[in-house]
Amino acid sequence: MKFSKNTWIKIFIVISVLCFVLLYYFLGFSEYLTFENLKSQKDFLKDYVEKNLFQSSIIYFLSYIITVAVGLPGASVLTLAGGAVFGLVWGVVLVSFASTIGATLNFLLSRYFFQDFVKKKFPKQIKEINEGIQKDGAFYLFTLRMIPLFPFFLINLLMGLTNISVWTFFFVSQIGMLLGTIVYVNAGTQIANIDSVQKIFSPEIILSFSLLGIFPTLTKKIINVIQETRILRKYKKPKRFDYNLAVIGAGSAGLVCAYIASTIRAKVALIEKHKMGGDCLNYGCVPSKAIISSAKKFHQIQKSNLYGIQVNSYSLNFIKVMQRVKEIIQKIEPHDSVDRYTKLGVDCILGNAKLVSPYEVEIDGKIITTKNIILASGAEPLIPNLEGIENVQYLTSENLWELKNLPEKLVVLGGGAIGCELAQAFSRLGSKVTIIEMTEYLLNKEDKFVSEFLYHKFTQEGIQILTQTKAQKFIVKENKKFIQCVKDNQIFEIEFNEVLLALGRKPRTFGFGLEELGISLNVNGTIQVNEYLQTIYPNIYACGDVVGPYQFTHVASHQAWYATVNALFRPFKKFKVNYDIIPYVIFTDPEIARVGLNEKEVLANHIDYEVTTFPFDDLDRSITETELEGKVQVITPKGKDKILGVTIIGANAGELLAEFTQAMKHKIGLRKILGTIHPYPTRSEVAKYIAGAWRKAHAPEKALKFLEKFHSWRR
């Protein structure tokens, strides 16, 4: 067998360590490194050291390093020996540096042998730990070093699994272990008066050290309070507040904040400058799903022959389609209306809000005072800086719904979720649609099979797709509009009647006082918040699209709960926002739904995984409905039924995703899903069938062969 250079190095290190361990016991060092032997040999050793200080210091120093590095017992006795034979000052110097060097070597051995394995085995946990280490690693290490209840050997090994730097580990360990080293070495100088090692640390001393170790944590909390007080100190705090909470923005996040606050009887102001319901109701989720529904019905009429139905005459009335969209918005409006929220006890204020201070919000000249503020200002369509864009009346998700006529030629700039959904809808309604996408695939965050499926589906429906294509500028000539693009170094033009910009959304962060208060933004323009959704001001929170990292209505609502509860119950209780399991749906036809990890992500996290799939063309209900496209893909760890992620392409994928999301949330594996009764014939059976496919792939072959012989014998 041929080993790599790295493997040979590991073998050499393992053999060297084993040799040290064997020599330690074979040569009887374990008998020498005892408290009793140290007491009996103290005078002899002290006399030898006085005559050979340099030589004995080197031998002692190296012995200590090896003992700690390899993890051999006897470090405590060696520390006492440092005080007994070298005295307090020189003993502390030797022990302090030797223990830190030995601990660092132990740390490096752990990192070299185990870090990659642990990262591969527990990628998510290690990622979270490393994020914490990057932020507060030195602080936590210092705290652990100060508490003698934590075995130092174990600390070395565990820290080796993280990404803390070697120099940080060395420096913090050197300082953190110093007090304990002084106590032990000093005890060594008094060894004649000590009966046993255990009596060096009485319960009182251990308690004192433990309190000393906890002290940095308490100090950090005190510092946080001081920092909060300092940042708020320059603003005059009202003696009495008008509101417990003021929410800026009445979109998905803001509405939930106001609802929760009013439910728990807090006095809350909800401030909106435009329309209640925000983007989701007026421009996003609601109108887009309404037009997608009309397009789907029209498409079904066109393929009615598949169902044995002959339709002799049908036509599309685009004005009525858009009228229906507006009627649906109007039907849902009461759920998000001023009237409803006023009845809930919320003060709904229409106007432009601006932060005057962490305690004051100005609305069109009127100032209200509030104990807490939540920023839920949402996001808006991203407009590219393309030459000539001012000469074309471009469409976005905000003004699309004002269209009076169906575009004959529609260019959709962007192949993400919004672009794909609306491109398919308008194509089915009769527009000639071209999608321009800069990256290699549509929906480039999804697995390749999803992008390829959608590419073929759209191509079949007559949509032109130009990937790896960059839009350069807009041109108007002879009353016709063109977009100039480049692909494979070839420049070409595409004529259009309307262009829809679907390049994503940018957070709304300007115009309401963030810059004046110095509230920080991230590189992507979102408001910078901590894990509790706090900004730099402890009483100003932010949630929803203005924060990210996911721009979904349900995530905005999820964050809103955390922001509201944390704001209203600070400082007594607070909760870290949790993004562990985020489901989402792309409402093309068929739908694309996902929760958890996809293959791209498990590969990036170095997870040893398996993929199980089940196609819809093998599901009875799909066959009866003649909706055979798509499949379910489940990702599990190698040999285990734990669900890491699910991707579904198919009719009603969004509804089917709910069972898998709940299973992941409550740690239910595929075995239990297989044992759950699903009604026949329904699409929900796909969960049972994919669980069965996983079980079949993990069938115990030896046991089955035995059973085959058993049943043969019984015959």
Image (tube, grey):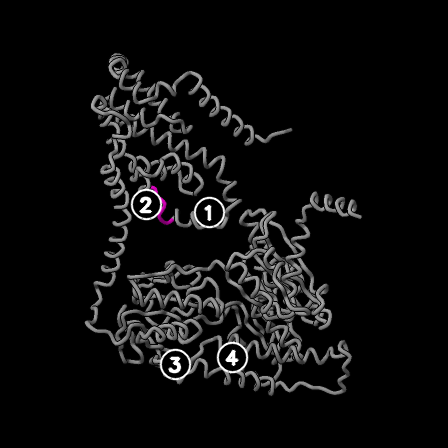
Does the magenta portion include 136? yes
Residue at the limit of the structure toward the right, as seen here: 715
Using the image, determine if residue 112 lies above or below residue 247. above
Q: Which residue is labeled 4 in the image?
A: 399
**Looking at the image, is mark 2 or mark 3 nearer the viewer?**
3
| N-term-proximal mark, 2 vs 1 | 1
Label annotation for residue 126? 1
Q: Which residue is mark 3?
A: 341
* Residue at image coords 76%, 48%: 711
Nearest to N terminus: mark 4 or mark 2: 2
Q: Is residue 35 left or right of residue 715?
A: left
Query: Can you tell which quarter of the image residue 546 is in?
Result: bottom left
Q: Quadrant of residue 570?
A: bottom left
Q: Nearer the viewer, residue 108 or 25?
A: 25
Task: Identify the disc placed on residue 139.
Answer: 2
Overall secondary structure of the magenta section: helix
C-alpha span from label 3 to label 4: 27 Å
Tell me which label, 3 or 1, sits earlier in the chain: 1
Q: Identify the image quadrant of residue 623.
A: bottom right
- CA–CA distance between discs 4 and 2? 52 Å
x%, y% of residue 194? Answer: 23, 25
Question: What amino acid is found at the position of numbered circle 3 in the picture?
Answer: Tyr
User: Does the rendering let one see residue 203?
Assistant: yes
Asked if disc 3 and disc 4 are in contact, CB closer than 8 Å, the reply is no
**In the depicted view, which residue is nearer to us: 685 or 711?**
711
Callout 4 touching callout 2 (CB < 8 Å): no
Residue situated furthest left in the rendering: 239
Q: Identify residue type, mark 2.
A: Phe
N-terminal of the pair, mark 2 or mark 3, is 2
Cα separation, mark 2 vs mark 1, equals 18 Å
For label 1, the SS is helix
Task: Please provide percent x and percent y for residue 607.
Answer: 56, 48
